[in-house]
Amino acid sequence: MGQQVIKTNNLCKRFGDFIAVDNITFEVAKGEIFGFLGANGAGKTTAMRMLCGLSSPSSGTATIAGFDVYRQTEQIKKNIGYMSQKFSLYEDLTVLENISFFGGIYGLSNRQIKDKREQLIDQLGLKGEAKKLVGSIPLGWKQKLAFSIAILHEPAIVFLDEPTGGVDPLTRRQFWNMIYEAADSGITIFVTTHYMDEAEYCNRISLMVDGSIKALDTPANLKLQYKASTMDEVFYELARGAKRGD
Amino acid sequence: MKQFLIFVKKEFAHVLRDRKTLLILFGMPIAQILIFGFALSNEVKNARIVVMDQAKDDASRNIIARIASSHNFELVHTVNNRRQLQAAFKSGTIKLAVIFPANFNADLLHQNKAQLQVIADASDPNYATTVTNYVSSIVQDYSAEINEQTVIPYRIIPQIRMLYNPQLKGAPSFVPGVMALVLMLVCVMMTAISIVKEKETGTMEILLVSPMSPLMIIISKAAPYLLLSLINLTSILLLSTFVLDVPVKGSLLLLFAESTLFIITCLSLGIFISIKTSSQQVAMLISLMGMMLPTILFSGFMFPIENMPLPLQLISNIVPSKWYYIIVKTIMIKGLGFTAIWKETLILTGTTLALLAISLKSFKIRLS
């Protein structure tokens, strides 16, 4: 693979005596779909917050899209997209208003917003719903819309925090097709999930246990290494030694 | 700047699409002004009174006639003995009784001195004091009249002049109080709820990951409520001037400037609450209990602060609405200028700066 868009080196985050993230080192290439796995409490969220420029690391280095996580959080924020499991859109705004609002706070020009709006509505087949409040459209559509909005400003990387929680399998499948399309267009996907079948869709995955990365490879290699037939077994094998959890 | 405008536009969409918010925002001030202006008043009208007239002479009839014609009293009936009197009080419908002894007029004419008894139901002390004062002044008026011809050698007559509110109307003191109350509620509660709502729905997370700086998010969140509060203020002042007949005597510009300062105080309080809480219900409860109650108790518009025990007086000093209430009263009712309120302004400015600093600091802590 070519250019590395995420590089971390011995990245740590401590809260007092508690080491939430312990010396994690990894790289993610441009256009890669990178699965970031781990049990609850393993430190995924803390690590992700550091990578998004929301929280400052205690030690170690990291660059996101070439920008330093300590000093260039502003540039990082301009170059990443983010979507959480809550599909956080404004439910009392219409589909179009949501697109315009998020386009606007990412600094898109009115011309760009207008083009993007038409393009998105077309792509998602939301023509009839464009002027409806987001609160009134089905969950699956909300989720697809949230993803489209997260990559509206054509970021280098998009962070997806358990993006498919509570969604039916068919919609999940469709959602992953969108992820593949985005990756093909050169956007790096950094995704956390609890669904092991989704882990199989990733190019590479890392598995966090108690704050450190215990395994990092392609799903096929990991299964080979742990002599497992499914990712489920690999996960179980690695995570059962965990001391933390909730 | 463009981000800011887009954000403000979005914020207005939230407010204008939510009927409940709209109702609280614009219905409440109007309702409160009307309730406080018309329904709630210290003045007692039509207090039910009984008379026991054992004299039935000129003087007693004259005084009874005056009482009966006063709009403060409603003469229910006359009783003949103490038993009936007691029964009247026990029934709870009677607030006051006036008893004239036999030979009332005769005493007055021959001994130059006569007594009458006034009995009030003091289970509500303020009410009892007010109605007995009314009776006393009616009696005094009468005795002054009959003394008109005689020259009393030594007499001191206090010339009373009620400054700023000569008719002792209730509205002039309520309007500033309602202004403090409404602004406090709208700014603190609305800001706190609107920020906490974004935390609850998860949109705050998205905003924080966006290139908008946290400070900018907070400012854009609060700015629309500053504007809405100023609209509210205008509607209160219009109602006060044209409906309650309480115009702004002092400078309107100064009043708006001071109000903006107070609104910013409230907004920073709202921001602070929103940072410390994570659900809309909690934010609302804290805003209501933590803000509305102290405003009613300690701003001085319902209960005089001078009458409170020292510890409570000291507590009242940290309630921002107390200072705002004094400021509004000074400008609006007394018509005085900035020189009269510079101290209060300074205190309010200090509080605002401190609150803003604390809010922004805890917002940063939450982020890292």
Image (cartoon, coloured by chain):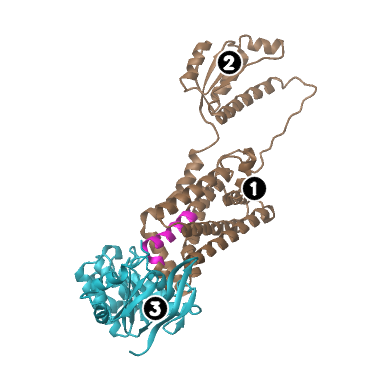
Chain colours: A cyan, B brown
Magenta-colored stretch includes residue B187: yes
Q: Residue at position x 54%, y 46% from top? A: B294
In this rendering, position of residue B55 left or right of residue A126:
right
List the residue tagged with mark 2: B99
What subunit carries mark 1? B
Q: At numbered mark 2, what does the secondary structure look like: helix, strand or loop?
A: strand
Magenta-colored stretch includes residue B198: yes
B355 or B164, nearer to the observer: B355
Q: Which of marks 1 and 3 is in front?
A: 3
x, y (%) of residue B321? 57, 50
Magenta portion: prevailing SS class? helix
Q: At numbered mark 3, what does the secondary structure look like: helix, strand or loop?
A: strand
**Which image quadrant is residue A50 in?**
bottom left
Instruction: Give, as a single range, the part of the protein colored magenta.
Output: B186-204
List the residue tagged with mark 3: A80
x, y (%) of residue B190? 45, 56
Residues beneath discs 2 and 1 located on the same chain: yes
Amino acid type, mark 2: Ile
Q: At numbered mark 1, what does the secondary structure look like: helix, strand or loop?
A: helix
* Residue B172 can be seen, yes or no: no
